[in-house]
Amino acid sequence: MRRRTCISFFVLSVLSAALCISSCDRMELMPQRPQSDEGKTVTLRVIVPEPVVVDPMTRAGAGDFDKIRDLNIVAADGGSDDSALFEVYYADGSQNGDPAVEMEEGKDITIHFSEEFTGRYGLTRKKFYIVANYGRKIDKAAVTTVGLLKALKQESSEGFPGIPVNGCMMFAEAGHAGTHTHPDTGQTGLSLSAELRRTVAMITVGIDGSRLAAGVSIVPRRISLHRVPVQCYLGMANKPYEDETLGIEEIGEQKGDGGELNWPMVVGDETLSSDQGQAPSWAASAETYAGGHYAGDDESLDVSDRTIAPLFMFENDHGGDAFGHEDGIRDPRLKRPAACRMAGEWGNLLEDRSTATCSYLEVEALYLRRNTDGTTRYGGTVRFRFFLGDDVSRNFDVLRDHYYKVTLQLEGNAVTEGGQVDENGDLTVDGSQVTWRVESDLRNVVIETGDIIVGGSGEYYPIDISGLESPRIYVKTENSSDETIMFVHYFNDAGNGSGTWGSLGGSPAETQVSKTDDGKTVLWIFISPWDPNLEDIYGDQGFKDGIRSVDVVLMDDDGSNAKELTRFKIVQYQPIRYEASGDYIEKEYGHQPITMYIDRVDREAMPWGFDGEELDYNANNGYANTYHLISEGPFDPDIYPGHGGNHRDVAVKYLPWGKQHGGSALIYATTLWYLPTYFQSPSGTINDLLNNKTFPDHNSDPGANGTDLHWAVPSIMGWQVIEKASIAGDLDPNHPVLPYMQYWTSNAVVADPDAGGDGAGTKDSYTYQFGRGLHSLTELDTYPADLRQDRAVAMRFRLVAIQDN
């Protein structure tokens, strides 16, 4: 979608054609006008164009990724870098006066200077520049010339180097664009046009696996940008390879660590027809393509597809094709800078100094190679890398205002360049084809879930294991030679619904893994919750700097000839304790302060749940919102006005872990109440647990104490408390809430219009986003419309528990 910002100075003019310039062109203002023309007004139109599209594979498509939050309209005495700035006019919304500004989402922005104002200051003889989203008025005392204006930079936010988390700044130089007639006064005069250029580029990723070999599957887990600039000039080319002051950050924006990608398993056409022309059972939900690119053209872009995960970075200009080596034209695997003279050891290309400023994309995925009977042959983590640029051969430019569509086309075994798989698909060391573009860690037994990350709430955790020849394995830890690990238990499945829980120790202990109805092999783990009353009782196994962890090793035997099958790590994060005070706390809880325990790390993305359910109640704390969904009633009309039905009938479908029907983050939180604490094995079996369709016996005011923490998805007000804690420096800086991500709140968009809803059948709930000033909103303010999201979309969240003081 095109958006134009129109800034109007009207002067009498015989020119009639309005000119729309491209994102790369500029037009000069008209020459100086006679004094008699200065009594009219002038209109300056600022255009936000579609970005230039770069697709190294197909060279098609376009995108739009901007919002205008404020404008600096800069008048200068001339167009040279030495020209002095005359005045800076600032607008952060619609306003009257000089300039008069009309800013409305989705429409052109018009800025108009009056006839009297234009004539008084001789504005028609000035050169104009536009800076959008600077966040404040530019200080004319410090920025005195056009050259200094162009040299202003957009810098990364503190704690997020290389990531433009609060939107992108834009810059434009105004040029003549014909005449304009003011709709109110009828005055006709000069129109100036300035086409904004963003400081950032956008990258989207598609994975085409249609030509993968039979039995090969790829499950994308994470996409990330690497070696990205930390800063970007507003009005000058951004060339970190020439200007070290711009800085390069090794890891830029990434998505997927929290499970929010939710992309399908990717297989080849051969797999989809390998079972008598049908897909085998293990690939029933697989597709040949994951991710994708926004549809549309240069005039209109459809950004509604939420399966697409855009990444953003500042411009990284390397000066064109000459920067790259000609070898890349012959073989894209050899794409590298011209200054790189290495003739081998391609796996070490990233260590060469010539690549230090070259931005690249990395796609991390679970790779599995299956036998014809569906059993796992081998698998593990793979990483695919791709140097960004205008092509796949020698260009390394990532230019501002460009949209890069990167499609990974995987063929055959897909990982021969990783050096572990040969051309026949055998798991054999083969260094002859190693390049930097593929890194693999493959083995015969695969932990599909990767390392286990758990919050302070504790959790039952199913670990999917592929490639086991026998359901009998031996479990041990290397963290202790003989001491029992007190906070980790595993389930020994004896079959027929029976079994026992065991404690993890330093010696291999025999256990049987569980089989699911769909044929998967699962090792069940229970991690005890953190208890504020028992912080010192764990001794050396307690939390250190908010973390405790254990390495788990799976063996095929317990004797001297035992072989390691695989290993993984369990990491548990202690919640953060924060005292919240204020009138809003007093109003909600009846007293202050309260103690809030806040998840230190994000939870894996899940849907909100209750898709399509007509909800009718919102509270200012997450527990009340959750209890409303699981309560059997009767419902007090003073607490739950207009309750339309028993939501518990829907809620129970999401038990026991909220995975059914796509999942529910809110119901998942209820499964963490009343878990066994210190050195207590869980009661019952996995079969009992999986068949448990009841909720804990709570009431609307649980009176949480230190032992019994009732975890819940925060309300909007709860998230405001969390952001205030972050601003105060009380969150863990190593695990920040990501300001470029939205997080679920427990507040739904209700059906009742009188309660702020939008009628029956709504499917939305509210999210929260850091860095947008939401922490200071009051109940009288309007919540941003773009933070409404479909409840079926998987999004990150954190949990909180409130302790009465």
Image: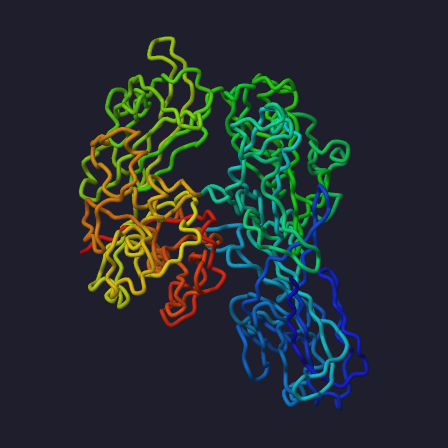
Image quadrant where one finds the C terminus:
bottom left
The mark tally for this picture is 0
Up the image or down, 459 lies above or below 101; here it is above
Nearer to the camera, 667 or 138: 667
The image shows residue 67 at horizontal and vertical percentages of 57, 63
**In this view, which residue lies farthest toward the right?**
14
Up the image or down, 129 lies above or below 664; here it is below
Up the image or down, 731 lies above or below 643; here it is above
Nearer to the camera, 701 or 459: 701
The image shows residue 140 at horizontal and vertical percentages of 57, 73
Task: Tell me if I can see residue 508 in this picture.
Answer: no
The image shows residue 226 at horizontal and vertical percentages of 56, 42
> In the drawing, does residue 64 fall left or right of residue 697?
right
The image shows residue 353 at horizontal and vertical percentages of 62, 37
> In the drawing, does residue 141 fall left or right of residue 683?
right
Up the image or down, 124 lies above or below 50; here it is below
> In the drawing, does residue 747 fall left or right of residue 303?
left
Image quadrant where one finds the N terminus:
bottom right
Task: Tell me if I can see residue 644 in this picture.
Answer: yes
